[in-house]
Amino acid sequence: MTDGPGKARHNPLRKRAVALAAMAAGLIAGGCVPASFRQVQTPRAGRAFDGRVAIVYSKDYQINLLGFERLHSFDIHKYARIYLQLQLDGLIRPADVFVPCPVTREQALGVHTPQFWDGLKKSKTVGRYLEVGAIGLMPGVLADAAIVSPFRCATGGTVLAGRLAVEHGIAINLAGGYNHARGDRGGGFNIFADVPIAIRILQQAGRIKRAMIVDLDVHQGDGPAVCFAGDESVFTFSIHQGDIYPYPKAHSDLDVELPAGTGDGEYMTALARHWPAVLDRFRPDIVFFVAGADVLADDPLAGLRLTVDGLVARDAAVIDACAGRDIPVAMVLAGGYGRNAWLAQYRSIRRTLRKYGQPDGRPNPPRKATLAERSYVR
């Protein structure tokens, strides 16, 4: 059966009522924040492990789609799971973590247009960028608080990670890598062009002159390619699956397209063929590593076939090449939509911490998650 004409007129009102009910339920659920997450909410400095590896994270990275998260395949709890597991395994404490400030309008306008920034007040615009049209039913102020604000915070995390990488050598933002956002728009579940913003801030401050973006997300890094087209101070390098989003592809300084079905061995061969040579040729002052986990075999939005061990080896090849040449590297996590995405990225970060930040072993005793923590990240 279908609704008659009289009922059809009220359908938008029913949709809005359902949306508001979902928002209320989400806000109630989101109020139960465990202590370990409350400790990483206020911006502050942390510490670099062994003076060399800095971790950047904020509780405010958590996107609260207020029930709408089920409409998108992205795991909004990925960042929180990684942060929690690092604690459970005794690798970090909350006090160790650098907590960023949100990116400001002035900072964002180094890349984005004023019209783009102002347009984020409209929930329909935000819903279009995140590919969840139902977000357009939200009042703009709620869309800002629940969605845009976490993206501002995570973008601030990439800005901070860039600065910390220059100061210490290696920095990892447990978010970021929004590689489909451009100066005048977002897209592909991305709002801000966080890596281009961070590069422009470092350049304007005189901290760097030349930067390289190594984008190993399964989807081409079209956003940075467009942002830095014709800019010889930034080299964009993307290895990605060739027959999936985005369409059409942009032109990076170096694009390497891989076919569906590519596994660990073929992937690492392609990376080894290009990565050390381009790094030595360009010699950047910093590398931003967009370390997407959507290359994994269980990813529902792509067709590469990497294993968890293969992803850890991929990330190690990038990090070790930078560390071996004393080139600062800032890692951001980008995409990853399969059930193993968070675990693979956790193991990669654990490997980097143990090799470069914790040469004497695990600094804290492991512990079990509390009930509140398990509920918060499920």
Image (spheres, rainbow, N blue to C red):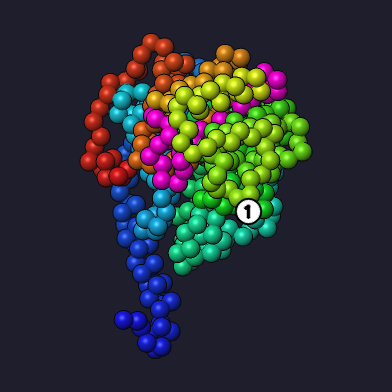
Residue at 77% across, 38% down: 230
Can you say whether 210 is above or below 336 in the image?
above
Residue at 67% across, 32% down: 254
Left or right for 160, reference 312: right
Can you say whether 290 is above or below 50 in the image?
below
Question: Where's the N terminus, which quadrant?
Answer: bottom left
Q: Position of residue 148 (x, y in %)?
A: 52, 53
Q: Residue furthest top?
A: 360
| Magenta region, residue range | 279-308
Residue at 56% across, 26% down: 270
The answer to whether one can see residue 170 in this image is: no
Query: Is residue 3 found inside the magenta-colored segment of the image?
Result: no
Q: Kindly identify the amino acid type of the residue bearing the numbered disc 1.
A: Arg
- The residue where tag 1 is placed is 185
Q: Position of residue 164 (x, y in %)?
A: 56, 27
Query: Could you say whether the residue bearing mark 1 is in a helix, strand or loop?
Result: loop
